[in-house]
Amino acid sequence: MNAKSVLVVVSMGALACASASATNVLVNPGFEDGLTSWSGGGAIRGGDPTPHGGLAYLFGGAVSSFYTYQMLTPATMGVSEADIDAGLVEIDFGGWQAGWGTQRDEGKIEIKFLDQASATLATMDLGWFHSNHTWTERSGVTVAPAGTRFVEFGFYGLRHDGSNCDAYLDDAFVIPQILPSGSTLAMFALAIGAARRRR
C-alpha cells in the first residue's frame, strides 16, 4: 500500500473517532457511592485486594451467586433512537475484574438490549472469568440492534469456594459511539478506491 492510500485509511479512522463521545455513561461506575444507581444483589468491599480505583468495588457477600445491573436509555447514553435504528450506535463495554486469594469464584460482564416492551433483542457477554487478587480489564464492542430502547449492563457473580461470593467488579464502563453514516462510509470507500487506482 502506498503513502497516499495509508493516509486515506488513517483519515477515515480519525473522522470515525471524531463522531464518538468517548464518555462512560454509567452512573457510579466505581461503586464509590455504594450501590446507588445499581439494582439487584451485591455488596460493597474496600480492601484485600485494594480497589482498582477509588475506595470501593462490587462483590457478592455471603451468597452463592448474585446479579447487579444498571439500566440505560438512549437519552441517558446521549444517542438518538433514530441512530440506534439505523445501526449507527456502537457500544464499548466492560470493567475491571478480580477475586480473592486463589479462590475460583467467577464473574461475568454482560450487556443486554431490550425493546420498548422490555423484551430482549440481543445479549452479549464476556464469559465467566476469575483473576486471583489481580485486577484485569475485560471489554467488548457491539452494535445496538434496531429497536433498542433500553440497555442493561449487568454483572454476575458465582461462588465456588469459601463463604463469600468473591467475584469483584470495579470501574465498569459503557461507552457509546456514533458510527459514520452510510453516505460517509460510501465517500470513504470511493476515496480508498481512488487511492488504490493511483498505485
Image (tube, rainbow, N blue to C red):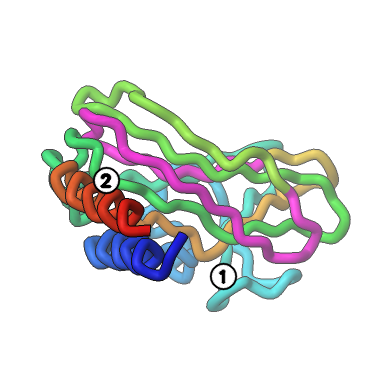
Residue mark closest to the camera, 1 vs 2: 2
Residue 104, percent from left and from top = 82, 46
For the residue marked with disc 1, what is the amino acid?
A: Ala
Label 1: how many residues lie within 10 Å, few (<14), some (14-19) or many (20+)?
A: many
Q: Secondary structure at mark 2?
A: strand
Magenta extent: 130-157
Residue at mark 2: 89
Which mark identifies residue 56? 1
- Of 80 and 109, the residue lying toward us: 80
Q: Is residue 135 magenta?
A: yes
Relative image position of residue 156 (x, y in whole percent)? 58, 41
Q: Is residue 142 at all visible to an observer of this figure?
A: yes
Q: Residue 99 at what x, y percent from top left?
A: 74, 57
Labelled disc at residue 68: none
**Residue located at (48% from left, 64% from top):** 31
Mark 2 residue crowding within 10 angstroms, few (<14) / some (14–19) / many (20+): many
Q: Quadrant location of residue 39?
A: top left
In the image, residue 23 above or below residue 59: below
Q: Quadrant of residue 191?
A: bottom left
For the residues marked 1 and 2, what is the alpha-carbon distance in whole angstroms? 31 Å
**Whether residue 24 can be seen here:** no
